[in-house]
Image (cartoon, rainbow, N blue to C red):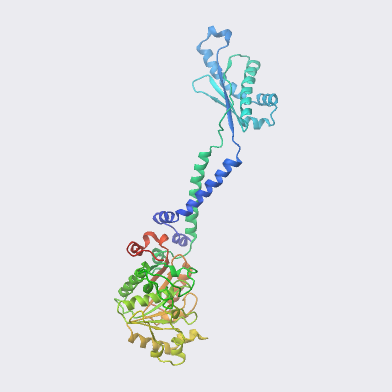
Amino acid sequence: MQYEQQEQELDLREIIHILTVRWWIIAIFTALSIIITGFVTFTMIDPVYKAETSLFVGKESDKIASLDLGEFNLNKSLVSDYRQLILSRLVSQEVIDELGLDMTVSTFQKKVEVTTIEDSRLFKISFESTDPKMAMDVANALAQVLVEKAQDIIQVKNIKIVDEAELPENPIKPNKIQNLLVAAVLGAFIGAGAVILVEYLDYTIKNANDVERLLKLNTIGEIPQFASEKRGKSKGLFSKRKHSSGKKRDKNAVSHVLITITDPKAPASEAYRSLRTNIGYSGIDKQVRLIVLTSSRMAEGKSTTAANMAVSMAQSGKNVLLIDADLRKPRVHRYFNLSNDIGLTDIVVKNVSTEEAIKKFSYVENLSIICSGSVPPNPTEILESKKLAELLQELKEKFDIVIIDTPPVGQLTDGAILASMADGVILVAASGESNIDMVRRARAALMQVNANIIGVVLTKIDKTRSGSYYTYYNYDKYYGSED
């Protein structure tokens, strides 16, 4: 349990970056907090007015000639007695009865305040009310009653009213500006907390650090998300689209999923070229010619990565063969706008020659493609067959690089079968989408067949979220952004 908690910890730099990127969420919470607080403050809270009167404790008039220090100190101490007298039930009830107030003594006492001035015999009586006239009347009534009670109870006549209470013009509550400022601060804190909580609970692979920390694998490619990967954004697989040259390509050409063809200057295209270079370095100790691509589940960009990787390698001058071995849900033929009438299944089952099944791709030299072919009822048996293993060895001798697109290894065993035959395996994971546990299971399935995992390719990286973790987006300032 402690290990899982450590895995989900966010360092300070990451928190700051997340808050910076998701500033709009914090702004929404702040704005909502201000709006709600403003509505309550201006429409639902009654303004409170405060009226106060000032009194002075001095020498009785008939004894003024004999004023001494003792009498002075005695008068100062009487201020405390007067304070308690004002707050007594006796005085409170008399004022309530005199003014005909509809409130209890306890409620009345909560609205009364007595303040003394330090090193002085002056003190003030104040009363708060939503009715400014009531506040004034009660403050003056309290002063008058106190003068009377001082004579009756304490038997002195040394208290004088200095200033009578006046009708207050401005309310003291609510402090509208203060309320709005507090609301803004609280809203910002709540928004920031919500952003961090959602990020903390997001149990997905998000960046290269996660790959290394959680999977103990290297990240060999980081592919930024481009328009055609956003599901539902395109009206059709072969819809018209302008690329960076400004020219409109043929709607019957390749899918714009092939970003390395349709927009070679895009950041994603540069990322695929970097992936090509990294794969080249991975084959220093052992020649990697037969490469399998798989993922933990569907829709992680596996087929898109395989297709663009094949194009990028062919563009570098290598003789590349791309095989669609996803016999359940093939996609390669759609990306390249090819017929799927003859393919891998037909070679293995119907003894169709490889020459007949291999299709050339006119847009890119050195790129050949074997589509999946007829959808078989028993894909696993075909992939496990000895004939397929022999076919792959044969093709490996004819081409510099053979790239195989396979089903998700986290959901089917097909990918693991082919991974055991490959020189290297690439595990594809979608940033912010691939569940950590599912990717771990996919890795474990590959390890069970002793697959040589070259590394992980992170796809669908959100430029607004990735920040300093990724470097590909610096190319935006040179090549411009995607459509």
Residue 446, by quadrant, is bottom left
Residue 284, by quadrant, is bottom left
Residue with the most extreme top position:
65
* Image spot of residue 222 (x, y percent): 38, 67
* Image spot of residue 14 (x, y percent): 41, 57
* Image spot of residue 188 (x, y percent): 48, 49
* Image spot of residue 408 (x, y percent): 47, 76
Q: Is residue 260 above or below residue 147?
A: below
Q: Is residue 209 left or right of residue 76?
A: left
* Near-viewer residue (22 or 476): 476
Q: Is residue 310 above or below residue 208?
A: below
* Near-viewer residue (48 or 169): 169
Give the quarter of the figure containing the C terminus: bottom left
* Near-viewer residue (57 or 478): 478
Q: Is residue 96 visible?
A: yes
* Near-viewer residue (292 or 36): 36
Residue that appears at 57% across and 44% down: 39
Residue that appears at 66% across and 32% down: 106
